[in-house]
Image: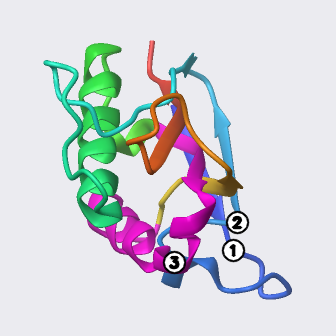
Amino acid sequence: MQKETLNPPDLFPSRQYGFSQIVATQGGKTVYFSGQVAWNAEQEIVGPGDLRQQVWQSLENVATAVQAAGGTLANIVSMRIYIVADKLSESQAVSEGLRAFFPGDNPPTTTWIGVPALANEGFLIEIEPIAVIEI
């Protein structure tokens, strides 16, 4: 799979927030994932009330899911990130998590969406990734 990230100078510098403006791919299979939240395997919320902990657990779950599909985090090309509205002021925790899990110059694109609530009132964030994996 060929992957190219682009950050045109006429768009705001998104790298500082842990994502790219554009990712273009060629070849490979596209894999769509369900939204990943801060549940562990026992369906217990990791980090109740703590956005930072929930970001990390959600990203760990993204890594687990993409590995199950035969890829790595480097295969993630895009993510929709849903954040409970009353936690949007803490969004730096999301940027920190993205920079930690996607270091280097080729992070995925992201769209951050403030929502009133998620499927469980304890969830503060949900991350829905898309990957392109070599066949």
- Give the residue type that dot 3 points to: Tyr
Q: Dot 1, how many residues are within 10 Å of its Cα: few (below 14), some (14-19), or many (20+)?
A: some
> Is residue 102 placed above or below 24 in the rendered structure?
below
- Residue at 48% x, 62% y is 106
User: Callout 1: helix, strand or loop?
Assistant: loop
Mark 3–mark 2 distance (CA, rounded to whole Å): 11 Å
> Which quadrant holds residue 84?
bottom right
Mark 2 residue type: Gln
Report the magenta residues as a range: 76-105
In front: label 3 or label 2: 3
Q: Is residue 81 above or below residue 35?
A: below
The disc label shown at residue 7, or none: 1
Q: Name the residue under label 2.
A: 21
Q: Do the residues labelled 2 and 1 touch (CB within 8 Å)?
A: yes
In magenta stretch: residue 5:
no
Q: Residues within 10 Å of mark 2 (few under 14, many from 20)?
A: some
Kindly identify the amino acid type of the residue bearing the numbered disc 1.
Answer: Asn
How far apart marks 3 and 1 lie (CA) works out to 12 Å
- For the residues labelled 3 and 1, say whether their Cβ atoms are less than 8 Å apart: no
